[in-house]
Image (spheres, grey):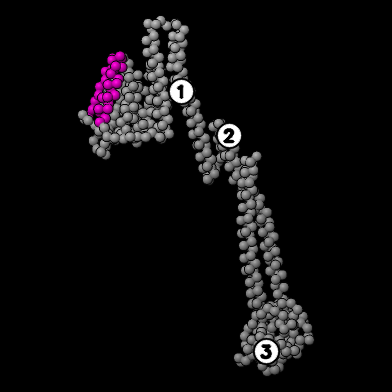
């Protein structure tokens, strides 16, 4: 239930975030539009009022200066402008007394004097724009443009055009209302788009979560089918790669357990059988030493198998600690060959040791390289038939700072398609080379891990003796 809550919350949070982003952007946009529209409408209205005032002032400038004014003509002109622009108009003389008003202004104002800073500034020849009630002439705020009536550089009066501020605001609000309604429709459409987009984005994540739970339960064959070229698709590919790696590791683990169980069962069964026979008195006393030797050999097999498993585990977990020193590699090879002298005699194997120089000093972990050489020579002895040949060779190429160590045998060889597999844990070649199946299948794997830990390489090739050739490199000392 908690997992389901997390899934829902991811979708919910993502949707809410997108909506908040859209809403914030809309509020900022609406505020900006309102601000610019307000300024635009006020500027347009002011320009309109100034143009109308300029027209009247230009036409009646001389009439004002001469004192001869056609009142009827002036009133008609004012009525036309009032109907066209929706503004109120009044005129004053040079003393600030109202000479004429448009029809929507009370006629009582005619003949009255208005004294304030706006009137004074206009009579001084300035064009003035103000917002207010103009000395109580209007009951609501008006946007008023005062324009001086000039003649020969002298102000003989002024004309005032007034437009109701609420009327301007109603126009602005109508525009904002359209924007707001458009925003509501856009928000509804955005919510729908955000819903489907969020579902599309979270769906593969939910699939990954479900697949992760299945894999956590031990079912490693689950894969994702996410067809996308973005980061989600890359994440899906990485998830599938992880699942494949886990499945491979699980297969290796099962093979490891099965192989260990198989290799441990054989010597344990032999030991148990011989001990039980000795306890039951089925083995004569004079044969005790013979069968005790067999039991002892089986215990050595168990010890060797256990040590190889431990060593392999250390190297694969990268906890193998190397104690690198300078030593004579050729001398170490001779020491290892002495250990196999009896086995060479038992199988009548001819062993050759070919070297470039009498002494070849390398920098490596002597103990671990001893184990590598032991495993490779032991492997060669197992798969070399009686009367065969084994050759160990060390070569130091010119202009290289490393030595090549090769172990050749005259056995049946290893097919090319299996040469890489022989370094895998518990892998054993087919029956053509498997005349000796007593090994654990860990020797070559341990050798590879040890050489890799030294930063060098080991590989398998066809031997010039007709069998297999295992060759590895080591760094020369002083390099």
Residue at left offset 27%, top offset 21%: 338
Which stretch appears magenta? 328-356
- Secondary structure at badge 2 equals helix
Q: Kindly identify which residue carries mark 1.
A: 260
Q: Kindly identify which residue carries mark 3.
A: 157
Q: Kindly identify which residue carries mark 2.
A: 214
Image location (x, y in percent) of residue 473: 31, 32
Image location (x, y in percent) of residue 69: 71, 91
Q: Is residue 108 above or below residue 348?
A: below
Distance of label 3 from label 2 (alpha carbons): 93 Å
Q: Is residue 215 above or below residue 388?
A: below
Q: Earlier in the sequence, mark 2 or mark 1?
A: 2
Q: On the picture, is 474 further left or further right than 50?
A: left
Q: 32 or 220, which lies in front?
A: 220
- Secondary structure at badge 3 equals strand
- Secondary structure at badge 1 equals helix
State which mark lies toward you, 1 or 3.
Answer: 1
Distance of label 1 from label 3 (alpha carbons): 116 Å
């Amino acid at each position: 239930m908690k997992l389901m809550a997390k899934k829902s919350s991811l979708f919910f949070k993502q949707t809410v975030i997108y909506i908040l982003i859209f809403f914030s952007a809309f509020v900022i946009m609406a505020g900006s539009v309102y601000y610019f529209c307000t300024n635009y409408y006020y500027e347009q209205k002011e320009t309109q009022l100034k143009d109308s005032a300029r027209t009247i002032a230009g036409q009646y400038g001389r009439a004002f200066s001469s004192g001869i004014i056609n009142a009827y003509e002036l009133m008609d002109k004012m009525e036309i402008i009032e109907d066209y622009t929706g503004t109120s108009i009044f005129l004053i003389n040079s003393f600030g007394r109202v000479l004429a008003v448009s029809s929507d202004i009370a006629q009582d104002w005619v003949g009255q004097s208005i004294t304030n800073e706006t009137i004074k500034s206009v009579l001084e020849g300035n064009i003035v724009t103000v917002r207010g009630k103009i000395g109580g002439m209007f009951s609501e705020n008006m946007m008023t443009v005062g324009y001086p009536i000039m003649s020969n550089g002298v102000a003989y009066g002024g004309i005032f055009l007034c437009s109701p501020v609420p009327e301007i605001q109603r126009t602005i609000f109508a525009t904002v209302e359209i924007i707001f309604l458009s925003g509501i429709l856009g928000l509804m459409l955005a919510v729908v788009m955000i819903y489907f987009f969020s579902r599309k984005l979270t769906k593969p994540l939910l699939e990954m979560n479900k697949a992760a739970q299945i894999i956590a339960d031990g079912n490693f064959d689950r894969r994702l089918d996410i067809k996308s070229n973005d980061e989600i698709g890359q994440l899906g590919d990485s998830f599938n790669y992880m699942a494949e790696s886990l499945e491979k590791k699980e297969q290796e683990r099962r093979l490891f357990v099965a192989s260990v169980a198989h290799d441990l069962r054989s010597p344990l069964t032999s030991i148990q059988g011989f001990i039980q026979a000795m306890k039951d008195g089925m083995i004569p006393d004079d044969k005790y030493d013979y069968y005790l030797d067999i039991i002892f050999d089986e215990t050595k097999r168990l010890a060797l198998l256990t040590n190889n498993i431990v060593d392999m585990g250390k190297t694969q977990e990268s906890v193998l600690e190397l104690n690198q020193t300078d030593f004579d590699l050729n001398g170490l090879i001779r020491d290892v060959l002495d250990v196999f002298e009896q086995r060479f005699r038992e199988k009548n194997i001819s062993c050759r040791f070919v070297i470039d120089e009498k002494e070849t000093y390398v920098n490596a972990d002597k103990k671990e390289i001893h184990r590598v050489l032991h495993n490779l020579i032991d492997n060669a002895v197992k798969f070399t038939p009686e009367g065969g040949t084994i050759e160990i060779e060390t070569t130091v190429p010119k202009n290289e700072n490393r030595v090549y160590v090769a172990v050749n045998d005259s056995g049946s060889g290893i097919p090319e398609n299996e040469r890489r597999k022989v370094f895998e844990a518990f892998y054993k070649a087919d029956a053509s080379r498997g005349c000796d199946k007593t090994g654990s299948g860990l020797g070559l794997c341990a050798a590879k891990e040890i050489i890799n830990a030294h930063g060098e390489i080991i590989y398998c090739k066809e031997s010039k003796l007709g069998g297999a050739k295992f060759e590895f490199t080591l760094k020369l000392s002083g390099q």
